[in-house]
Amino acid sequence: MALEESQEQNQLHFLIIPMGSPGHYIPTIDMAKLLAQHGVRVTIVTTPVNALRFGSILDQAIESGLPICFLEFSFPYKEFGIPEGCESIDDLPSLGLASALMQAYRSLQTQIEQYIEKLDPRPNCMLADTFLLWPGDTAKKFQIPIVIFDGMNCFTLMCNHVLHLSKVYESVGDSELFVLPGLPDRIELTRSQLPFTFSSTIKGMSDYNEKLRVSESEAFGVVVNSFEELEQGYVDKYQQEKGDNVWCIGPLSLCHKDESEKVQRGNKSSVNKNDCLKWLDSQEKGSVMYACLGSVSRIEPAQLIELALALESSKRPFIWVVRAGHKTEKIEKWIDEEGFEERTKDRALLIHGWAPQLLVLSHPAIGGFLTHCGWNSTLEGVCAGVPMVTWPQFQEQFYNEKLVVQVLRTGVSVGAQKTSGLLVDEDKPGELVKSEAFLKALEIVMEEGKEGEERRKRAKELSKIANTSIEVGGSSHRNMTRLIEDIKKLSKK
Ligand code: UDP
């Protein structure tokens, strides 16, 4: 829709409130761009470091006239004992500070309410991260409809839902497989693979879960970074539970078409764009395994060594994004002292820090993606049309693995058995997945036989559908229009 047209129609205003984790901030910023492309005026609540880090991707969009602005509040580092400059979970020196970070985000409520108080007219909609919890109260106070976003897919939302209702996990041992009841597919998991929100041992968890459920049930609706064709049965089920106000509007990452945008998504890239593209250009089509484990996971160096050795013994070209939070130094030392980079330099690109993931994944040289199954990465892998090696770490990542390996049949598991417990104790060593397990899954994904070809074909087909879904007439485009119309109708009332 042309911008002028939307302005004539009394432009809607969305107030967007993201949360400080790349897996949440990045898609929220994408969503702001998409909304603005649909003629909505958006204001994104942010803080200084996040504005620079996550916001710069919108510079081009704003320059081109899209109605996006940032509302910046100073971040209360001192008050919550957070080191200056750390506004996102992956910047924290220790994940022990994660709950202080969440509290700091919650403390912005007063300032945001003071801002809304002065606004005339009030925003037509608040679009906020589910995990913040407080935006629902603010929305109620100012009688603004609120739409929530938790960064996950309908498959995950339904898994959580049926587990919550059935409590089936309560009567099984930690490593005993059980079926999640009432889902379109027979999905089996163990208790050790469930998100930590199902833990009975973590203090305050049931209270937090209850608050999440209340804020979800009180919201006007839920936006989902997914597309209907990917998980239709689960979208239908979720809509049966929640009503029509579930809008699948993804894949959000597809709103960035330019290389220059892709390269700065989420952080400053640790590799020069041209060097990265030159390296990829020099590789054969579909030959490279890209290994990246998201933004939050801080994997033990001993475990990363197993992964590195598998990548090396595969004898295939690979990109490995080396990052392990405060443990990075140790793994970098191993890489250096053991001569790993030297040994593999003729067929490997090591990215030390932040990878321009969208840019890498969209290159034809990429033939497989070894992922920790964070939802953004998983969906970006789907969009790129590449099969995946799945190595879930924590939270809903084991669900995502099931979706990819069992339902979509575009991935092969390395066979991880339990969540890493990272968000509870980042230094407690988890299970050790051996290099043989990585190598086996990697070879299956990259193999040229019939099974591999069929997996690749399925991945390519899904990518095509994903790309069509956000175009005019596609399911996600229609859902975005429906969301905007629904808010418009409410505003008229
Ligand atoms: N990401 C990236 N470069 C990196 C690491 C991560 O661009 O080196 C992006 C990735 O593309 C995704 C997000 O960061 O959009 C990570 O979100 P995800 O849900 O995959 O995992 P999380 O980091 O939340 O575990």
Image (tube, rainbow, N blue to C red):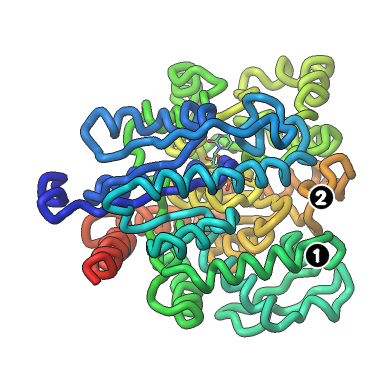
* Mark drawn on residue 308: none
Residue indicated by mark 2:
424
Name the residue at 48% across, 54% down: 128
x and y percent of residue 321 in the render?
64, 30
Seen from the viewer's position, the closer of residues 456 and 109 is: 109
Name the side, left or right, on which 4 lies relative to 47. Answer: left
Q: Secondary structure at mark 2?
A: loop
On screen, residue 332 above or below 399: above
Name the residue at 36% across, 46% down: 118
x and y percent of residue 147 in the render?
43, 62
x and y percent of residue 87 in the render?
61, 33
On screen, residue 86 above or below 446: above
Q: Residues within 10 Å of mark 2 (few under 14, many from 20)?
A: few
Seen from the viewer's position, the closer of residues 406 and 131 is: 131
Residue indicated by mark 1:
199
Q: CA distance from mark 2 to mark 1?
A: 10 Å
x and y percent of residue 483 in the render?
31, 64
Name the residue at 66% across, 24% down: 84
Seen from the viewer's position, the closer of residues 243 and 459 is: 243
On screen, residue 152 above or below 56: below
